[in-house]
Amino acid sequence: MYYLVSVILAAGKGTRMKSELVKVLHPVAGRPMLAYPVAAAKAVGSSRIIVVAGHQKDKVEAALQGQQVDIALQAEQLGSGHAVLMAAPHLKDFEGDVLILCGDVPLITTETLEAFLATHRENKACVSVLTVELDNPAGYGRILRTGGGDLCGIIEHRDATAAQLAVHEINTGIYCCRAPFLFEALGKVKTNNDQGEYYLPDIVSIAAAAGMKVQAMKTGDFEEVAGINDRAGLAKAEAAMQARIAGRHMAEGVTIFDPHATYIEADVQIGADTVVYPGTSLRGVTRIGCGCIIDMHSVIKDSIIGNGVHIKPSCMIDESTIADNVVVGPFAHLRPQAVLSEGARVGNFVEIKKSRIGTGSKVNHLTYIGDATIGSGVNVGAGTITCNYDGKRKHPTVIEDNVFIGSNTALVAPVTICKNALIGAGSTITKNVPENTLAVARGSQKNYENFMLPKPGKDKD
Ligand code: UD1
Ligand code: CA
């Protein structure tokens, strides 16, 4: 049995983000960036995951609720080495390997980590460091090697000599280290550097000097190991994550005409043969079935959509459930708890909130439906309003099967319109309407005959 524990560094504030929110909680594709290394640590078989938190520790802890991670507190940020040391009390008597990841490196893949761990194990290394060659290594810790090419240390940019600055191989900040050695070495790390901090990379030179096996594994993919330090870095990571998410959906048979112009968050599921047009934003825990058309400029959030659904352009759909073969939009607004049954039709400038629309029913134009239950085969005419709010409380409207509501009707709730009823256009309905009944509630028309029109030209002066 192989024992691996992951420690994820997330105590820093992220000053360069210039944000009220701690850096590691800034979202990438809808998830806090810290969630990605946590997921990667899980995927490579960590038996425990310890997140070292400091700034906004409570928020970090809340964001990770239910994830089975332990939180270690680093009250003062005295350096990355000091941060790892804060995990030590959680790992007493642990003799396996510790994988160290950064909370601000969300693009790291399971494949890269697996390859990294495999070399670490095969070579029976004491300390392994993941490195990458950069054209412009400015700002990063440089990898130092002996004349024979063996890894012997890491020097931070600000502490490096001109010769060391010429090195293009850099430290990604991802390490694997035998636990007993790690915590012993961290006890020896000093603060004799430009920042006066306890540097985690110093464990490499300590191990090398002690004759332990240290090694660097070079990865070819800088994008994966890029850390987010500012908003520009956040935008780059988002773009890379979007490309990855779109690629995954396309591989599963989804058409995305323009992946660069489509925003899909990490927890969205899309069925095969669904077509997603540019300008669309699919967010939260959204599940879209097969063979749907999601036309331009719609935002769909935390919603479930069946098969063969057509979302026409410019719809906002939030916490709603849509059954098969429904057509929505253009310009429709489905607010939380809108439920559209099979074959329903919701047209332009219609708002639906906390309401069920029955099978095959139509709400096609300029209508507000709130707190309503609508049966099957119902036609709701243009300009219909459920008056659900009396200024204090919300009241329900029930419209049973096969009702026809004429245009410009106000349904003053609570009110029930029973089966097969017909409401005359322009009615203000305040009383229940029985089955098979025509209800008309409007001022009746009067025609005034021989009405005198003013004579032409009379208004001249
Ligand atoms: C670090 C490495 C550098 C490497 C680079 C890769 C050090 C000293 N240097 O530099 O060699 O090339 O990452 O991106 O580690 N942290 C804490 N507590 C602290 C200090 C840091 O939790 O007291 C966390 C940060 O939140 C971050 C990580 O450790 O997740 C790295 O710290 P950071 O200050 O970003 O180091 P870099 O300058 O990026
Ligand atoms: Ca960093």
Image: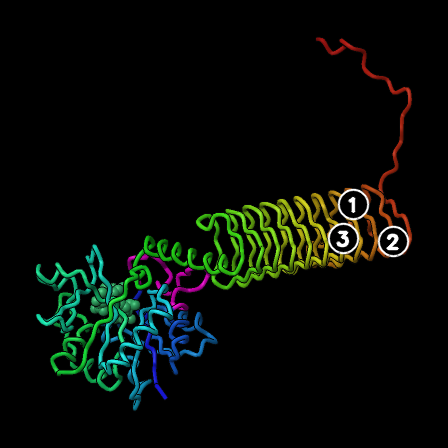
Q: Residue drawn at (10%, 72%), measured in percent from left and top? A: 148
Report, in whole angstroms, how far the alpha carbon at label 1 lies from the one at label 2. Answer: 16 Å
Give the amino acid type for the residue marked by disc 1 in the picture.
Answer: Thr
The x and y percentages for residue 146 are 10, 71
If the image is split into quadrants, where does the C terminus sit? Answer: top right
Q: Is residue 273 above or below residue 208?
A: above
The answer to which image quadrant residue 396 occupies is bottom right
The x and y percentages for residue 183 are 23, 83
Report, in whole angstroms, how far the alpha carbon at label 1 lies from the one at label 3. Answer: 17 Å
Which residue is the site of mark 2?
Answer: 420
Q: Secondary structure at mark 2?
A: loop
The x and y percentages for residue 322 are 66, 58
Category of crowding for the residue at label 2, using alpha-carbon neighbours closer than 10 angstroms: few (below 14), some (14–19), many (at least 20): some
Q: Which residues are magenta?
A: 14-36
Give the amino acid type for the residue marked by disc 3 in the picture.
Answer: Ser
Mark toward the start of the polypeptide (1 vs 3): 3
**In the visual, does 416 lie left or right of 308?**
right
If the image is split into quadrants, where does the N terminus sit? Answer: bottom left
Which residue is the site of mark 3?
Answer: 361
Category of crowding for the residue at label 1, using alpha-carbon neighbours closer than 10 angstroms: few (below 14), some (14–19), many (at least 20): many
Magenta includes 27? yes
Q: Is mark 3 within 8 Å of ligand 1?
A: no
Q: Secondary structure at mark 3?
A: loop
Label of residue 280 in the image: none
Magenta includes 442? no
Q: Is mark 2 within 8 Å of ligand 1?
A: no
Which residue is the site of mark 1?
Answer: 409
**Circle 1 or circle 3, nearest the eye:** 3
The answer to which image quadrant residue 193 occupies is bottom left
